[in-house]
Image: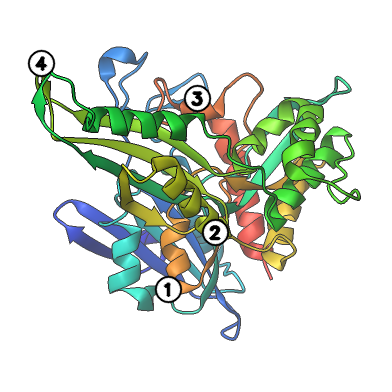
Amino acid sequence: MGEAGLEPRLLESAPRRSNVVARIPGTDPAAPALLVHGHLDVVPADPAMWSTHPFSGEVREGVVWGRGAIDMKNAVAMAVAVARHWARTGRRPRRDTVLAFTADEEASAAYGAQWLVRTHPELFAGCTEAVGESGGHTEHVRAPDGRTVRLYPVAAGERGTAWLRLWASGTAGHGSRPNSDNAVQAVAAAVARIGEHRWPHRLTPLTRAAITEIGAAVGVKADLDAPGFDPDRDLPGVLDRLGEAAALVRGTVRESANPTMLNAGYKVNVIPSDAGAGVDGRVLPGGRESFEAAMDELTGPRVGWEYEHSSPALESPVEAPVFAAMRAALLAFDPSGHVVPVCMAGGTDAKQFSELGIAGYGFTPLLMPPGLDRDAMFHGVDERVPVEALRFGVRVLDRFLSTVE
Ligand SMILES: [Zn+2]
């Protein structure tokens, strides 16, 4: 980035945990700044499973292969390409544009975005919105009338994270003896209740907008404001009518809590005194209180629970100039596509930057060809991205960053 006339700062939160931040000065000093962030770390990859070495970055028949090709060195590379292009051609955006490339997103962000936000908030001075991971890519979906429609979901929110630890204590003893105070049994019963719980459907302003706009794109009228509309009773039917496109919203119309870990015991004929479990909970904006009440009830008096990790749900406005600029930039290069707002089921670094009051959007534009399953690329074997997908992304990103009000 130095060769592009920028003065990037390399900030190490710990040895080999590098974060890079640079600010491109805008032409209008009175305008708020815009943050573009992406994470530099990747999850591991086993070369034995791959068709090419996962860390080779090989380009084969117009496709870049390697860990991070989608998640998410692609986005970092596109942002740098735009910055270098601006430097070569002497262009500058209207708003200050802060580029932040982070460590540790695939873990807890403690060495990455969270550390940056807590120790160097001045780097983000003036930033009001951020664009980052996930969104703005092509989803080819079959509409109920048989047409294939290209949707570009842009994330305007994320469910909150609620990773829980459950525990119970009981009376230890011999496995052959009667025992009415068995910790394993208590935790197992709570885990089964949580797994079977049917979380009520809820609509937030964002999921409401998502369903309405996706419906319009695939030719289905989703009348969420019909008199007497009851999300729990009526929403599953609306989603069914959306067909394939419902996959973009199905995971974000209610809370979820999936049991993921069990720990207890050390020998089959010994009843242990303690047992524990882990649960991955995700919470919609405004749902924290009811989620906690449900968890109290599901665990019951016999089993305790606490947060192992908790982070807030996000919801950024869809009726905003930033969203309009993302929509226009995508449509400029795919005029017959449809840009739709969505909520993400999981979380990204946007949660960390929200601590500074920055409204986050998921926007990593890519023209994905039909048949290449982008979702399967995340943390998957043979992660790859077509060069043409990146070219489209760079053009869209350039247009967005150059035009955003
Ligand atoms: Zn990622």
Tell me where residue 271 appears, x and y as whole percent: 14, 25
Which is nearer the eye, 319 or 382? Answer: 319
Whole-Å distance between the Cαs marked 3 and 1? 33 Å
In contact (CB < 8 Å): disc 3 and disc 4: no
In the image, what residue occupies the spot 47% across and 27% down? 377
Q: Quadrant of ligand 1?
A: top left
Horizontal side, residue 33 vs residue 103: left or right: right
The residue located at (67%, 63%) in the rendering is 317
- Amino acid found under the numbered disc labelled 2: Leu
Query: As rendered, which of 27 and 350 lies closer to the eye?
Result: 350
Q: Nearer the viewer, residue 62 or 283?
A: 283
The residue carrying mark 1 is 124
Residue 232 picture location, percent across and down: 72, 40
Q: Is residue 138 left or right of residue 174?
A: right
**Kind of residue at disc 4:** Asn
Above or below — where is 45 with respect to 357? above
Q: Quadrant of residue 318?
A: bottom right
Q: Hey, what amino acid is under mark 1?
A: Phe
